[in-house]
Amino acid sequence: MTKRVSLTMAGMAGTLAIGVAIVFGSARINQEPASYIVRADSTGQAIELVAAVGGDVTHELGIIEAVAATLTPEQVTDLRSREAVRQVTADGSVETAAGTMGPYVNFPALVGADRLHAEGYTGRSVTVAVLDSGMAAIAELNKDTSGVTRTLRRYNSIKDQEGTHLDKYGHGTHVASIILNTDFSDDGTGRFNSIAPDVKAVPVKTFNGTGVGTYADVLRGLDWILSKRDEYNIRVLNLSFSAKVNSHYWEDPINQAVMRLWQAGVVVVASAGNKGPDAMKIGVPGNNPYVITVGAMTDNYTPTDPSDDYLASFSAAGPTVEGFVKPDIVAPGGHLVSRTRIKSKLATSYPQFHDHDKYFTMSGTSQAAAVVSGIAALILDADPGLSPDDVKCRLMASAKPAVDSNGDLAYSIFQQGAGRVDAYAAAHSNATGCANGGLDIDMDLAGQRHFGGRANRDEDGNYYLMGMDGYIWTDGYVWTDGYVWTDAYVWTDGYVWTDAYVWTDGSVGPNGYIWTDGYVWTDGYVWTDGYVWTDGYIWTDTLTETVRTNVWVDQE
């Protein structure tokens, strides 16, 4: 018998922590030039098109056959009228945020990474790129456990320069430290206070000293990473930010670039965002069906007692607008202690959250994503031949869902995905073919096919998976003690929710979205009032794309 998974809407207020939120602001009412992203069939063609209307190119973005350019409203109108132009997107700023301080948590042991360290897997053969606010010049981050420099190259996508570009803000250092810090934990066990202490590092500085960047800077950073993928053996990319969804996944420029990296063999790990607990709050690029999207759980300040662990209330829940189950997995994201310089902007702004020596404590799906990026590196260290789809499959197949005392799911799959990540089990897994079924990234990027998942919503507002029954989530968002993360749970249909359907025409018809196998959104495109995009997509010259810092939250 198949099972149906549903998720009821809840009224609890969402809270935000670490991450990036991209908010599309008020209409542009003046006629001043502004920054736009212009896509064509090639970057060279985009340059010619911008020049033809008198605009000024500021960034070459080969990763998505685009440029960033300064254009007047009249020039934008002219460009959009030209057949060779594929897309004109308003550029905007991007800003990171932080959380509050709390006690030490032994997150490597919580996910079993310490057991892999004991077997000799520390990520030494893998390079991880971290696109963030940079990484401080701290010995325990710049050198591996043998004292060898492992920071291969630093890149500043704001200035388009390679060299020494450090982290004045502090967010990127905190995230990178979770992945690769060579410090030992302070619990007397002699374990490392990171997931993959020997990985090679490529920090990409995209956010400035106050945590702000732009869409174009993010894209240029992703473009540079793709260009250096082979030279530095970049196998994993950490994206600890979450932007507001303002289009279908395939229309968002950041998602387009992220898909190119996945296509090229880079495992992309993205935070789910911190707008939980309500449904349909997964941000960009976490809403991308290909990547590994990570939500957050917490050990409830009892790292040696797993019985009271729970899903963090700020962790964003799915499904995505296109019906995909997200997040894919969850990882420790509550009160994680990690390195950040005391003179960084975050530490000086919130000195009470720094230990006034080395460490800063923050919560969020940004931290959870960093944990999974480190685990992905350990998996590839153990088995270098794996594809990004293989790594995603093994992470999901070995995850442990939270269940209650009756053995039923404690949280919907739209909240916890396949469950809490298990590094040891994932690295020793032989699972294949259980992720990204039915997707075709080549056709997706070419614009020939786009995809949707199994999620739908019934007349009572419950989210469920088409073709499955059961798992009705009736108690709302309740966080209580007594849940356990178990590997004994049997998914009756495997990971059928990862299988995708083809959009028959890529647009909304009179009956909603019609899938090729006959599934129909019977109520049309009725998710919420917030997912109505005029003119097809909200990438127009009537809005400015501003990015602002997420609010601070209490630790969980």
Image (spheres, helix red, strand yellow):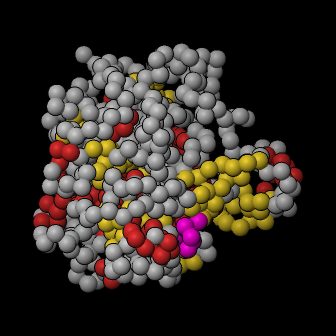
Q: How many marks?
A: 0
Most extreme residue toward the front is 352
Q: Is residue 449 visible?
A: yes
Which portion, as a residue range, is magenta?
205-212
- 517, above or below 385, in the image: above
Of residues 50 and 243, the one nearer the viewer is 243
Please indicate whether residue 92 sits to the left or right of residue 272 in the image. right
Q: Inspect the magenta stretch and tell me whether residue 113 lies in it.
A: no
Residue drawn at (47%, 57%) of the image: 552
Q: Main secondary structure of the magenta part?
A: loop
Q: Quadrant of residue 239?
A: bottom left
- 340, above or below 237, in the image: below
Residue drawn at (20%, 45%) of the image: 308
Residue drawn at (69%, 49%) of the image: 25
Q: In the image, residue 283 lies at what x, y percent?
A: 50, 46
Of residues 334 and 368, the one nearer the viewer is 334
Q: In the image, residue 461 lies at what x, y percent?
A: 47, 22
For the N terminus, give its image quadrant: top left
Q: Is residue 170 visible?
A: no
Q: Quadrant of residue 136?
A: bottom left
Q: In the image, residue 325 lies at what x, y percent?
A: 40, 35
Please indicate whether residue 406 sits to the left or right of residue 361 in the image. left
Q: In the image, residue 2 lies at what x, y percent?
A: 28, 19
Please indicate whether residue 499 sits to the left or right of residue 459 in the image. left
Of residues 187 and 352, the one nearer the viewer is 352
Residue drawn at (83%, 48%) of the image: 77
